[in-house]
Amino acid sequence: MNKFEANFNSLSEAGCPQWFRDAKFGIWSHWGAQSVPMYGDWYARNMYIEGSPQYLYHVRHYGHPSKFGYKDICALWKAENFDPDSLMELYYKAGARYFVAQAMHHDHFFNYPSKLNRMNSVQVGPMKDICGLWQKAAQRLGLPFGLTEHLGASFSWSRVNKGFDEYGPFKGVPYDGNDPAWQDFYFDNREHGINNKGELYPWYTPNKNFQKYWLDVMRELIDLYTPDLLYSDGALPFGEIWADAHIPNPDEANYALGLEAVARLYNASAAKYGKNQAVYTQKDRRSAVYRVGILDIEKSQLPDINPEPWQTDTCIGNWFYDVRQHYKHADQIAEMLVDIISKNGTMLLNVLQKPDGTIDDEAEFILKELAAWFKINAEGVYGTRPWKISGEGITKVHIEGFREDKTSWNETDFRFVKKDNTVYAFMMSLPRGGAAVLRSFNEGENISAVRLLGLGNLEFKHEFGVLTVKMPENMPSDFANCIAITLK
């Protein structure tokens, strides 16, 4: 067995494992110590930005960050009601065919027993190997198990904890990130500069010592868990700080550490399974970079079919539990999933957990609605591939980074996938007038049968390139029903 080498050409030969192409839908636990305040994403950063909502909440709830800093939030995280087996069963019933856990966020708190970072969930807070417990629960149900790393941005991201208030009773008093006793956790990152507006400096620091630390952590993570998926929250480290996103052929030398981590991932997987079964995802949209793995698009997607598989990562609400946040409803999630898979994509959905490890009643309700939808429509999701076109109709998904408004579909809108000799046409809106009318099947496509998933055979007429399907009065699903069209 030839080993993968740490270069673009060698790693691009890994390809996409079939399990990922077939799974279509995964659930993600984007969970860690930042869930403790239940006040949303980037808490460990924004609590040090004077005047921000999270700073105000922190000061009034816990105290000033010179006295009670993020390290003290970490100590409050207990995960005392965390039951990964029960949650995994719920996720599986809700349609997930792979599961991903967060290894660490930008906050630099690790959810596993690291020998490189004392601030981890086995030594502080929960006193549990969160990643290991998730992996065992996934393995019991035969689900591929992935991990996400957000460490690459941590060095510059956390620079704000070196600041101080410019107004008020603590004016000029340094935040606890200035304490020399905690520099290993908060980083000695003053080189990036600071102001109280909280501007984020380069996502990936050019600091060589930190870059080496990142690679050491990736080695540790891969060696401990041999994950089936590894996600980097950003572009492939650390080339982004040198190469402009519009340069089509980036200098490979700038990506040496990232390429080494991916090679280690693929070689570990090949040693475990006999061939590589791992997926690496990152967010650089240049094919010259993402060919080493899979393109990931955060809270957005692509406009049409991509030749290579890709992934959308999104969430039902905020990234970390947030008492202020509205949740997506199950219909929007299913409609997003259908639109994504029609374009050769896969959806990874974060289900929010409270600090004790449980999910709330609304999240459980959404999962049960998805379970009912998948029970009817799974045939049109798993194992499918793009058809000749992704869809038809007058409505297009609004594509804008980090914006996911619910799309106002109408009866002309369908999304297509195929499997063997069957084309699956998802109706993005309930049909009107007792019939569904599709215009993408030309006269040369000989249709032998039409079914409605969850019901059975339907009457149809195919003339002059127009397929008209008689619909029942009562549909199996309240949203995104699926017509299975068998071609001879």
Image (cartoon, rainbow, N blue to C red):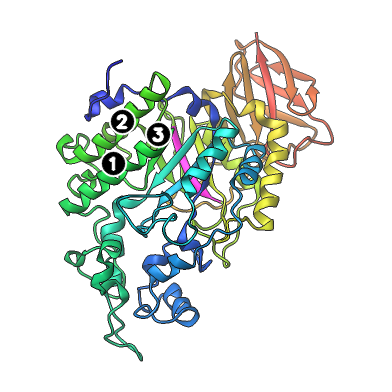
The residue lying at 51 percent from left, 65 percent from top is: 36
Any magenta on residue 138?
A: no
Numbered-mark total = 3
Q: Is mark 2 on a helix, strand or loop?
A: loop
Which residues lie in the magenta part? 310-315
Is the residue under label 1 in contact with that under label 2 (CB below 8 Å)?
yes
Q: Residue 319, relative to residue 464: is it above or below?
A: below
Residue carrying label 1: 236
Binning the other alpha carbons within 10 Å of mark 1 as few (below 14), some (14 to 19) or many (20 upward) gives many
Q: Is mark 1 on a helix, strand or loop?
A: loop
Res 208 visible: yes
Q: What's the CA distance linking mark 3 and mark 1?
A: 19 Å
The residue lying at 58 percent from left, 67 percent from top is: 323
Amino acid on which disc 1 is placed:
Leu
Q: Residue 23, relative to residue 187: is it above or below?
A: above
Q: Residue 172, relative to residue 42: is it above or below?
A: below
Which is in the foreground here, disc 3 or disc 2? 3
Which is in the foreground here, disc 3 or disc 1? 3
Image disc number at residue 226: 3
Q: Please tell me whether the stretch drawn in magenta is mainly helix, strand or loop.
A: strand
Is the residue under label 2 in contact with that under label 3 (CB below 8 Å)?
no
Q: What's the CA distance linking mark 3 and mark 2?
A: 18 Å
Q: Which of marks 3 and 1 is nearer the N terminus?
A: 3
Residue 360 horizontal/vertical position (percent) = 65, 58
Amino acid on which disc 3 is placed:
Thr
Residue carrying label 2: 292
